[in-house]
Image (cartoon, rainbow, N blue to C red):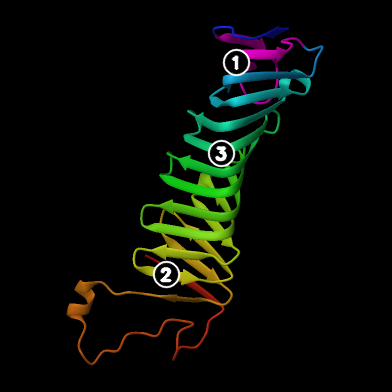
Amino acid sequence: MKGRGLPLLLLLLALPLGADDGTIEFSADSMSGTSGKARETTVLEGNARVRVGSLSISGDRIELSGKDFRYVKASGGVKGEDTDKGFSFSSDAVDYDRDSEVAVLRGNADLEDSKNDVSAKAALISYNRKTEVALLQVGVRLIRKNIDCSSGFALYRRAVSLLELSGNPLVKRGSDEFKANRISVDLDTERISLDGSVSGSLKESAETEEKKPESEAPAPVPGESGAEPSGQGVIDE
């Protein structure tokens, strides 16, 4: 089946696959391939969109392949949203496996977690809808309210609001900064755990400065001159 210049092509396929409701819905300006199971690949072009349960993915081009269209590959201004899980995303391209429910966002990947008020960016983001765990790689930046994190790699566990950073991680909490080989952040409590080559800076508030006696010296920060370096640390709000 092949169509060009059609108004809007809309197909509904009853496919018993994955944890979705068994239906994949897709639309586009044109389509090449087949809507049946004899052929393995169907290509949607122009305002292409696919919906699998509560997850929708759109892009300039979407390719469906595998048995029962298990694999969804989108490219060109890709955007997506999961209304049930409470997150949206954008990237240059995305690969989604309907069976494992793993989405891999490639190039300028941006994940917006509206459920937990978290914004995350990286060159590559792999997100598992079943476990609600996101692996972020290269140029990672994650922000939640008062917390601003950057690193080479990060593991974000949405269900428990826990972030694990490695690869020259830097965490900013307000005016305070923390560095270490590995940093864990509880995004709910803003509790920060540092491990290996710990350093940082803490800035007291103006109110604290006014109440502090003149003779009282500020406590040394681990890793700064005059302080003993520490291999571990836990910082509470």
* C-alpha distance separating marks 3 and 1: 21 Å
Residue at image location 56% in from the left, 38% down from the top: 91
Helix, strand or loop status at disc 1: strand
Whether residue 37 appears in this view of the structure is: yes
- Asked whether residue 199 is drawn in magenta, I would say no
Quadrant holding the C terminus: bottom left
Picture coordinates of residue 22, whole percent (x, y): 65, 17
The amino acid type of the residue labelled 2 equals Glu
Residue hosting label 2: 177
Residue 91: which disc?
3
* C-alpha distance separating marks 2 and 3: 29 Å
Residue at image location 69% in from the left, 19% down from the top: 43
Which contiguous range is marked in magenta? 8-36
The amino acid type of the residue labelled 1 equals Glu
Which numbered disc, 3 or 1, marks the residue that appears first in the sequence? 1
Helix, strand or loop status at disc 2: strand
Residue at image location 63% in from the left, 35% down from the top: 94
Whether residue 52 appears in this view of the structure is: no
User: Viewer-nearest of labels 3 and 1?
Assistant: 3
